[in-house]
Amino acid sequence: MLSHSENSRNLKRLELETNELKDEGMESLAMSPNLINIEYLNVKQNEIKDEGARSIAIGSMRKLNFLNINQNEISDKGYKAIAESDQLPLLTELHIYEGNITTSIEPKNSLKRSKKLKALKYLY
């Protein structure tokens, strides 16, 4: 598996759109010590829910500057975890809206106001 391979340590970009990762797969990727150099992560349309979003928020991908989590099953709770993350200091572009579960505009506002996501410039 990609997350267990030491050969993955030099990867900077991962395009994993439509791979049915689910929360378990996202957790494996986010927590992997072999993927700490990832800067660009596209996990659009992977059946990721709040636990998968939480894995991203607490994971080891501290160099991440682009994240696409569109068309998953993430709710306000998952977005809140990302907004409160100390692990995403370089995140400048975040794609969240298309097809995710949310009950309000609050996720967008909490991400925009986040004191933790200081580098965030583009929120789609």
Image: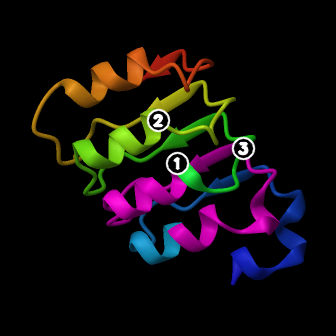
- Residue type at mark 3 is Arg
Res 19 → quadrant: bottom left
Residue at numbered disc 1: 57
The disc, 1 or 3, on the residue closer to the chain's N-terminal end is 1
Residue at numbered disc 3: 62
Residue 33 seen in the current view: yes
Label 2 secondary element: loop
Q: Return the residue nearer the eye: 63 or 84.
A: 84
Local crowd at mark 3 within 10 Å, few (<14), some, or many (≥20)? many
Label 1 secondary element: helix
Q: Are marks 1 and 3 in contact (CB under 8 Å)?
A: no
Label 3 secondary element: loop
Counting from the top left corner in percent of width and height, residue 28 is at: 59, 74
Q: Nearer the viewer, mark 1 or mark 2?
A: 2
Residue shown at the point (23%, 42%) measured from the top left: 76
Q: Is residue 88 magenta?
A: no
- Residue type at mark 1 is Ala
Residue at numbered disc 2: 84
Local crowd at mark 1 within 10 Å, few (<14), some, or many (≥20)? many
Q: Are marks 1 and 2 in contact (CB under 8 Å)?
A: yes
Q: Return the residue nearer the eye: 110 or 11.
A: 110
Is 73 placed left or right of 113 in the picture?
left
Query: Taking 95 as reference, is 29 above or below it?
Result: below
